[in-house]
Amino acid sequence: MQTLTLEPRFTHPACPSCGNVFPIERITAGRSSSEAIGHCAFCKAATQILLPEKHKKLVYLDQSFISDAWDAMHSGSTNSLEHQIFTRLAALRERQNILIVVSDIHSLETSAIPDSAKRSGVWEFANHLSTGNIAGTWDDIYLLQQRRVLADLGTAEGFPLSDIGLDDPFRIRIGIQVIPTNRWRPSLAASTAQPKLQVVEQFQNILNSQEGSLGSGSTSADCLVLVRELWCKQLLEGISALKSRQTAVRRFEAASQSSADLRAAIAELMEAPTSPFLRIINQVVSDLAETALDQLHDLLLIDPTGGCACVRLMTAFEAEMLWAWYKGHGKTITNPDNLNQKYGRSRLNDFAHVSTFLPYVDVLTTDNAMVNFCRREVASKEVAAFQAKLYSKKSYPDFERWLDDLSVTQSTQ
Ligand SMILES: [Zn+2]
C-alpha cells in the first residue's frame, strides 16, 4: 500500500498512481485517528493517507443559541444575526478551523420543546453541528476532575479534551464522518422532567433553608462559604456511608458459617448508613489506590471544592443565586415560569454548562442573564481564572467579529 502525507491546508488527496482525487465516499477511516485510507476506483488500489494535526478553536454552543439559530434558519430570515453567525460557524467548521462542542446538559431542554417537529429538528441540528460529539454533563466532568486530583495530588491541574468527549481533536479529518447519534438519543427521549411547580417549590425550599443558615448582615462571601460547606458536608457523608458499607461487606465475607455470625453480618450490612452521594463517591474512588477515600476526606477538610474547577465555579454561581435570594430578589415573583428562569432548573442548567465547559473551550455562548451572573463579585473571581470568551445575544455582534477575525488569521496561515 502506498502512503501519502496530507498537507494541512489541502484536504482533497489524490491517488499517487493515477492522480485522480479520491471522492469523499472513497475515503474510509484508518486504524487510528491519524490516518485514513483512500480507495482508487481506477487503479483498484488502496492508499494510506497520513493526517496532519491542525489547531482548532473550540466553540461551545448552548441551547439558547442553537434554538435561535434553528428558528432563524426556518423562518427564512437570512439577515438575522443568528443566521449570519451560523453561516460563519459552518464555514469555519468546514475548513476545520473550529470544533463545535454541544453538551448533553441541553438534551433535557430540547426534550421539553412542545413542538415535536422543532424538537427533533433542534436535536438533529445540534448533532450535525458537533459532528455527533455530544459532551457529557456536569456530573460526568466532576467525576473526571475529582479522580484526576486524587490520582496525582499536588500536581498542576489540566483540562484534557478527552474529558469532554474529544479524542485527538486537533487532527485533520477527511472522508465521510459517521455520526454516532444513538448515544445521545435515549437522554433526549427520556421524559425525566418533573412537573414545573414541584421543581420550583423544591428550589424555594432549598434557598429558604440555606438563607436560614445565614445570619443577619451576611455578605456574598458568606454565601460562598455556606454553599461550599454544604457541598463538602454531603460528600463527607457519602464517604462515611461508603466506609460503613465496605466494613459491613468485609465482616459479611469473613463471617463463619455459623448462622448467628451471618445474621449479625447481614444486619450490619442492612443497617449501614446510606447517603445520596454514596454512588458518586464510589465512582470517584473506583479503581484508585485503597487510600483514595481517606485522601479525598482529608482533601475536603482543607479545600471544600476538592480542587475541582467545576465545583469552584458551580458553588460560586450558587452562592450568587443565594445572595440574590437573601437580599429579597425573587421572593415577590409568583409566576412559576419566571421563578424557574431565575431561581430554578433553567438557571441551574446555565450554571451547569458554564461551570463544566469554561475551562475547556475558547468560546462559550450562554444567555444574557448568565453573562451578568458571571460578572458579579463572587462569580467573577472564579470566572477570571479562565481565558474563554463568553458571548450572549447582547454581544452576538462581538461573536461575529471574533469569527471574522479567525477567518482572516486562519486563511493567512
Ligand atoms: Zn489511482
Image: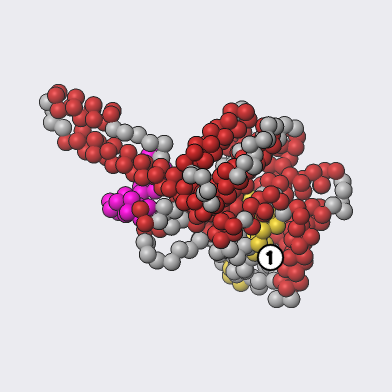
Query: Outermost residue, bottom direction?
Result: 412
Camera-side residue of 336 and 40? 336
Percent position of residue 361, x then y: 60, 60
Q: Which residue is mark 1?
A: 97
- Amino acid tagged 1: Asn
Comparing 269 with 89, the one in front is: 269
Q: What quarter of the picture does the C terminus occupy?
A: bottom right
Residue 337 in view in this figure: yes
Is 88 left or right of 13, judged from the image as shown?
Answer: right
Q: State yes or no: residue 359 in magenta.
A: no
Disc 1 on helix, strand or loop?
loop
Q: Locate residue 370, reporting x and y percent.
A: 66, 50
Residue at screen point 35% across, 34% down: 274
Quarter of the rendering occupied by the N terminus: bottom right
Count residues near mark 1 (Cα–Cα under 10 Å), then give few for <14, some for 14-19, many for 20+: many
Give the extent of the magenta segment: 278-300
Name the residue: 85% across, 43% down: 75
Percent across and percent down for residue 277 are 41, 40
- Answer with left or right where residue 283 lies relative to residue 88: left
The reply to whether residue 193 is visible in this rendering is no
State the image quarter where residue 411 is shown: bottom right
Question: Which of the 4 image quarters holds residue 386?
Answer: bottom right
Q: Is-magenta flag for residue 288? A: yes
* Left or right: 25 in relation to 154: right
